[in-house]
Image (cartoon, grey):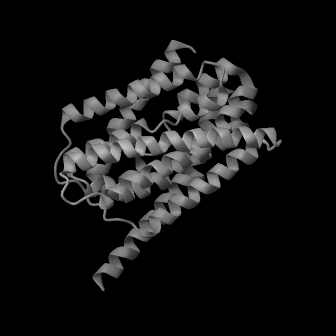
Amino acid sequence: MDGQTALLAAVMAGVVATTVTVLIEKYGGVLGGILGTIPTTIIPAAIGMGSEGGDDSLILSLAIVPAGMLINAIFLSTWAILPSKLPKTWNSNKRLIVTSICSLLVWTSTGIFAIKTVDLAIDKNYSAYQIAITGFVLVGTLGAIMCWNLKPAPKGNNQVSKKILVSRGFVAATAIGVAVIISGLGMPLIAGLASVFPAIFLTSMVALWIAQGPSVPLGAAGPMMMGGASVAAYSIIAMWSMIEYGLIVGSAIAWIGSIILWSIPSFAYVNWRSKIQKFDAST
């Protein structure tokens, strides 16, 4: 894997990880969660996988990305559900640590299950598009369900410190950079899964919890889940566009298409549900 590609992915991850925190802090979890989850780090990862492994490897790697985003949605649902189930006697830091560890264990176990399932689907002669579209439908459905009854997602009252922003940007950059390097090992399914490792989701949740308390990150989990499906949409479009129009132009087509076809409708849906719940609460 070209070191420059890994470096580019790492830098983009660091920038977007910082931006997500600022957006959620400024606009609240509903709007910030959608804006902060448009396709970003997947772009250099996809270009790198395409240049390293060729068309067939690229298509197979992209095919598992929607399943990877489904895993990330399950990862985020852990953040939305688990904290309220933990003992009330635990302090905030203890609940944060337990939630973080449990969410990563959930991601790892479901990731292993996803790879085995996709391997089985390939053995049964399901096409890459069938695998990808199935994953996309599942993650989109789960996101819509989680956003139907939105948790409170207020704007942050406390500013996330620059030290925390820099630290989480570095962590996300390191994780994505390593993931892109791993994608050059000749294992396309693992490469595709590694490209959607939830470094940005995890660091977003942790940084916001530390700075704002649990209400802001927990309220952002549903919208981030919904918005994150745009990465799955990007991968499906890219399976066609990057082959037909080349890695750079094809990636741009996939990015624009995912924003128009998923991110904008997702924002409209989440905004509608948010207004409905505010109206219901006031009556």
Confirm whether residue 131 shows in the render. Answer: yes
Q: Position of residue 274 (x, y in %)?
A: 39, 69
Q: Is residue 203 left or right of residue 8?
A: left
Q: Position of residue 1 (x, y in %)?
A: 58, 15
Q: Quadrant of residue 124?
A: top right
- Up the image or down, 227 lies above or below 50; here it is below
Q: As drawn, which residue projects farthest toward the right?
A: 125
Q: Position of residue 48 (x, y in %)?
A: 59, 22
- Residue located 38% across and 59% down the image: 81
Going 63% across and 51% down the picture, which residue do you hit?
136
Number of labelled discs? 0
Residue projecting furthest to the top:
3
Q: Nearer the viewer, residue 133 or 119?
A: 119
Residue 134 in the image, given as x and y percentages of width and height? 68, 52
The quarter of the picture where residue 101 lies is top left
Q: Quadrant of the C terminus?
A: bottom left
